[in-house]
Image: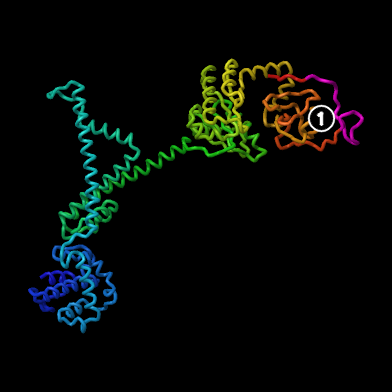
Amino acid sequence: DIIHSVYVVASGFDLKENCPAPNSSSEQGFKTMRKYAVAACLAASLTSTSAFVPQAGRPTAAFPTLKRIDDIRRVPAARELNAEPVDIIQSLSSGQHESGVNGVSTLVDAVSTLLARGGGGMTNAVPPSEGVTLGFLGGGFAVIAWFLFNEYVYLKNKDSTMVEAAGIGESGEKDFTWGELIDYRLEYFFSTSEFANVILLLGLSYLLVVVGAGLLVVGDSNDYGTISEAAWTAWTYVVDPGAQADAPSDFVPRTVSLGVTLGGLLVFALLIGIVGESIGEKLDDLKTGQSRVFESGHTLMLNWNDKSIAVIQQIALANESEGGGMMVVLSNLEKEEMEDRLQMAIDAKENPLDLMGTEVVFRKGNPILESDLKKVSAASSRAIIALTPPESTADEADANMLRQVLAIKALDEDFGKNGSHVVVELQDVDNRGLIEMVAPDTAEVIVNHDMIGRLMLQCARTPELAFVLDSMMGFEGSEFYFDTWPELHGCNFKEITVRFDDAIPVGFRNVDGDVRLNPADDDVYREGEEILVLAEDDDSYEPNAGTYSLEAGECNEGIDCPTLLMERPPEKVLF
């Protein structure tokens, strides 16, 4: 009966009419019957027109070991056998293994050995893969159940605590519901857990697979005899809505496929939402300037006020000779707002801003926080320009500047020793000593109100001075530069005045940073000092060969000697 039911389903061939029934009571009859079963499996696997072939690998109630058909196909003898299933059955039934179809006996013996590994012939042994699948599904379900139970206990205790705190008796009416408690717990979970969305997505998918696989095994054991097959089918329903079209026509499989597919659509929608939200948050971070700046040797400007555009313009002019440079701006303003202001200055019809190859990078942050200073690579910058924050009183702004200088000092104790420096803007001259006290060798203090007042007074007394200052205090035209020239060591200032063809020496700066403007003629340029000159650019001048004569009447032919009108005392600093 087993042979007949399996083979008729497999190939439509009536086994009872074509093969004599063996004597199943004897040991030889049992072996022959077992070989009939093997031949029926082989026939089902080799018959391409059989209705059983699309379900190869699914055990049935009549023949549980049919799940090993895939193993039969891998037997070398099966690939070499060229015969019809009817010929195989007739050859086996006649007992002519050697004289029958070539290779049938070898194939049957090999396949019988494979089937015997499952537990000794036609047994319903559970393969190792089933144990792994059951352990995986059961372990995950246990974890979910444990989590939900702990949450229930927590909410139960929270409910009792709230009732006790409110003094409500057993008969009293609570002013909250369990739904509100669950909402509170969910809100807390999603706001404190970074992976809450991913955990929810995986949990829902896992429950759909477990419940769907269980219902398929219980409700349709003929088509889904193993939990592995049922779990994989449930998973295809979750990830592919079109997979339900291949579900068996019975009520239970189609109902389960419909329910799991609807749940899969929910999971897919949740997945799209999570991915979209993650991408949106990343784009928002990029727009708001939250990423770190990886630069060195750049100019850093802290805060943004009405002087920022002018500062950017001057830095761009200074970098023009180098083909451009990098400038980073750190401010509490939104990154997009600062970019819009810069773009408006560039697009202005009158006096538009020209960056001349300089790149400007904006970042939002607090300049007094060490973490934000690290974000803009303040320690590796060439210079830092600290502007006073807008909409602050003089004392508040200066206090903020003091904290910025301290933050820079805390960021790198050696800042300033490698040539880097900080220019700090203050609003009250009385607070200047505070900055000089905490950073005497690092910070250069500029009290803008005091300086502007002095400039206005000097220009009012000497109108031509405004043109001179405008030419010197910007990077348009000529400006001041410090540099070291070892070949001029030992020369006095009178000799140095005629050693530069494209620059005007105006003083020295010693190793302590003190500047001597317009020194005496016999003031000697020493090792370690720098020469201060007025030149068009830092690379537009260099010492000449020293062929000029300093005494009248001793000039080289064709060269006009400089004329020293009179002896003059050293000038004082204007400010």
Specify the quadrant that holds the N terminus: bottom left
Residue occupying the far left of the picture: 25
The magenta-colored residue range is: 549-569
Residue 478 shows up from this direction: no
Q: Which residue is mark 1?
A: 495
Q: Is residue 78 visible?
A: yes
Quarter of image, res 174: top left
Q: Position of residue 114 (x, y in %)?
A: 22, 68
The quadrant of the rendering that contains the C terminus is top right
Label 1 crowd (10 A; few <14 / some 14-19 / many >=20): some
544 or 253: which is nearer to us? Answer: 544
Q: Residue at x 74, y 26 (%)?
A: 507
- Residue in front for this viewpoint, 122 or 429: 122
Seen in the picture, residue 540 relative to 251 is either above or below; the reply is above
Residue 18 sits above or below residue 274 on the image = below
Q: Hey, what amino acid is under mark 1?
A: Glu
Q: Is residue 471 magenta?
A: no
Kindly identify the residue that appears in the image at 53 percent across and 35 percent down: 377
Image location of residue 220, percent across then percent down: 16, 57
Quadrant of residue 573 in the image?
A: top right
- Which residue extends farthest bottom? 99
Q: Nearer the viewer, residue 31 or 59?
A: 31
Q: Is residue 553 above or below residue 456?
A: below
Percent x, y for residue 371? 47, 32
Image x and y of residue 565, in percent: 85, 23
Is 143 placed above or below 572 here?
A: below
Give the residue at the far right of this rendering.
553
